[in-house]
Image: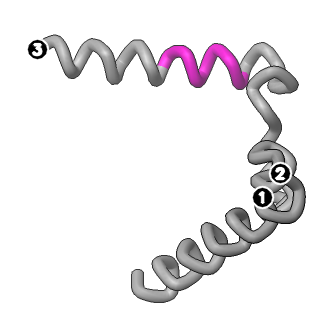
Amino acid sequence: VEELMVFLDVAVFEIILAYLEKKDWKDAFFSVLPQRKGAVPLAEADDSSKRALSGREDEDNDSDSS
């Protein structure tokens, strides 16, 4: 768990440094994020990814209202 926390701290630091260079959060984030993870901006995501995300949001909202 400690190794993961160190990795996340380094990743956040790298994203912030990239933002300072690029002045664009999306470019900074995707320049640091490993390409093998397959992350894409929501505007570029395929329909199945968008449906999966919207389903999770609906479930989160349901649990908040109970």
Do tag 1 and tag 2 residues touch (Cβ < 8 Å)?
A: yes
Q: Which of the two discs, 1 and 3, labels the residue nearer the N terminus?
A: 1
Q: Where in the figure is residue 22, as x and y percent of width and height?
A: 88, 56
Q: Where in the figure is residue 10, as x and y percent of width and height?
A: 62, 79
Residue that badge 1 annotates:
19
**Magenta-drawn stretch contains 53:** yes
Q: Is residue 13 left or right of residue 9?
A: right
Q: Distance from label 3 to label 2 (Cα)?
A: 41 Å
Q: Which of the two discs, 3 and 2, labels the residue nearer the N terminus?
A: 2
From which residue to which does the magenta span run? 49-55
Which numbered disc covers residue 66? Answer: 3
**Magenta-drawn stretch contains 23:** no
Query: Helix or strand or loop: what does disc 2 sit on?
Result: loop
Which numbered disc covers residue 23? Answer: 2
Name the amino acid type tagged 2. Lys
Q: Is residue 4 above or below residue 16?
A: below
Q: Where in the figure is residue 18, as x and y percent of width and height?
A: 81, 65
Q: Is residue 55 above or below residue 33?
A: above
Answer few, some or many: residues within 10 Å of disc 3's Cα (few below 14, many 20 plus, some between 14 and 19): few
Which mark lies nearer to you, 3 or 2?
A: 2
